[in-house]
Amino acid sequence: MEELKKKARELLEAKTVTMVIGYEEGTAGIARPAFIMDPSKAEKLIFDKRCNHNLALYLSKKEVKRAGKIAIVAPMPVMKSVIVLASENQVTENNLVVLGISADEKLVEFENFSAVEKYITEHPESYRAKDKELLDRIDKMNPQERWEFWQKELSKCIKCYACRGACPMCYCGTCTVDCNQPQWISVPSHEIGNLEWHLMRAMHLAGRCINCGQCADSCPLDLPVNILTLKISEDVLKNFNYKAGTSLQQDYVMSTYNPNDKENFIG
Amino acid sequence: MNEKLIIRKGSLGKLFEQMQKSGKLIYAPVNKDDKAEFDVLNDFNNYREDYIQTVQSIKSVVFPRHEAILKYRKDHSDVKLDDIDLSSGPETVLFGVHPCDAAGFDVLHAVFTGEYNDKFFVERMKKVTVISMSCSKCDDFCFCTSVGLAPDSGKGSDILLTKLSSGDYLADVISEKGKAIIDSAKELFEETNSEQLAANTKLIADVPVKFDLDKVNNKLGTAFESPVWLAHSMRCLGCGACAFVCPTCSCFDIQDEGNSTCGSRVKCWDSCGFSNFTLHASKHNPRDEQSQRWRQRVLHKFSYQPEQLKIYGCVGCGRCSRACPVDMNLQEHLTAVNNEQ
């Protein structure tokens, strides 16, 4: 990715941005997020198939916001997340440069967010193979089998909230699970506490999840929690013709009333 | 006490059966979805000896994810409090845990019996016997030798087994609890002599020393304001994965759960990595940024605990670094502190 390193260096040297968020070589053969502020350090940037953290999560961190104007290395999931965050007024194109990465790992430069939006629409993506496989398996289950499947999976949860931490859309200053006046969600990681947490998380991401799968990939216990939000995004598409991360003008599906909304779920 | 005995290759299963027959609850590493995890072992065929590390530590046996510490119920106009009685719990054996995990119990013990005697931990620990197994394998994340331990350390163990080149096991009998196990299965253990020991190689992993613990401790003493914390923690997600898989992390939260007629007070795992860990009622947060929370994690384990409890809060198992979604590698950070000019 010489062109990425070059671009990052140029942006930093010209002081167009103060920080480039990308990927670097980590320990034990792992790629990890990198925060480059010194142009000479742009050399550290890498991009390959190991680079799958959704870096957009860092755009809401106060340490990053404080840095000023940022450039972000953006494979497709990051591009989509930027569009969701822009539609929710969390980022603006005045303080963010999107360094797109195409499916064949080439640098794609964008004039503005509208260009990112256009690129996303022109490059539709399918599900990751492992997600598709599990989704198909769950779709074939009857309600009882599904309930048992999720009970078994969610009972393992230790509530470390890595799923929340890895998600760019989980940017709330105070997460509902941390509210204690009143306490909405049971804190201990017992069966009901885990179920409440994962259902709440999934509902709060309805129509906002771009299916990057990082919630599941970050889980130390490999719980496939991304399937919950993936399934909801399918329902949202089917019922409201709404796909997260494809339009800058999207409203939040859960709080938008449209007279043409289907009402077939009522009674 | 430090008696050395031999237990033959084929006798390990018999030892398990005898312990099981005597009503002991036995936890051991077993295969779960292709990974090794600790669980109750009911069939010795499921025992997995050759694992490098489980994802989760075994601390939950004495410090569960959540546990009721009292129950209340309303009886007309009266409120009744019920204490939790742990005395009827089964005798428990932790079999085949690695020396790092065994040493972790010493750290938990120091915390839970220090300023305050946590009877829940103490009651559970009383019933636990640790039969550990020296590590014959390690990976890049292991660093026990850098924190004063070793892949064949007996710290925290009641019996330490070490595999020999013959396939048999050397049993170091370390405590009275360990001796009680040996006494209950005497016929399975043989006396050994120095010639026999010399003829056999102990199969022990070679874990390289990565940093000088005293030097790191020394440097951390003046590192509170160092820019290193921000530099190291920019990528930290602020989740609790590291703390929850850690064999020595002991922080907990107290929650009340219930309704107007009955309920319980629950002790549940908490993590200094969470933003609300130090949030005051006034909304002021003395650790408002992730870098301050990461600093707390490192200083607590490598500066405050050794100073206050005379024990380091890390056993070098490497679980935190394996579990971290963004490669916050503790060993790498400590090595950087060590090498800093």
Image (cartoon, coloured by chain):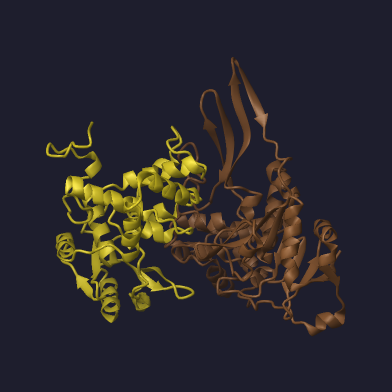
Q: Which residue sits at x=35%, y=75%?
A: A45
Q: Closer to the camera, B27 or A83?
A: B27
Q: Is residue B192 left or right of residue A212?
A: right
Q: Quadrant of the C terminus of chain A?
A: top left
Q: Closer to the camera, A55 or A104?
A: A104
Question: Can I make out residue B307 in this image?
Answer: no
Q: Is residue B83 above or below residue B287?
A: above
Q: Is residue A32 above or below residue A114?
A: below
Q: Which residue sits at x=69%, y=77%?
A: B204
Question: Measured from the top left, where is residue B54 in percent x and y?
Answer: 57, 63
Q: Is residue B106 left or right of residue A33?
A: right
Q: Residue furthest bottom?
A: B199
Question: Can I make out residue B210 in this image?
Answer: yes
Q: What color is chain B drawn in? A: brown
Q: Residue furthest left?
A: A260
* Quadrant in the rendering for residue A260: top left
Q: Is residue A97 above or below residue B264?
A: below
- Number of numbered discs overlaid on the protein picture: 0
Question: Measured from the top left, where is residue A57 in percent x and y?
Answer: 34, 57
* Quadrant in the rendering for residue B191: bottom right
* Quadrant in the rendering for residue B16: bottom right
Q: What color is chain A drawn in? A: yellow
Q: Closer to the camera, B255 or B101?
A: B101
Q: Is residue A264 left or right of residue A9?
A: left
Question: Measured from the top left, where is residue B160 in percent x and y?
Answer: 75, 66
Q: Which residue sits at x=49%, y=36%?
A: B281
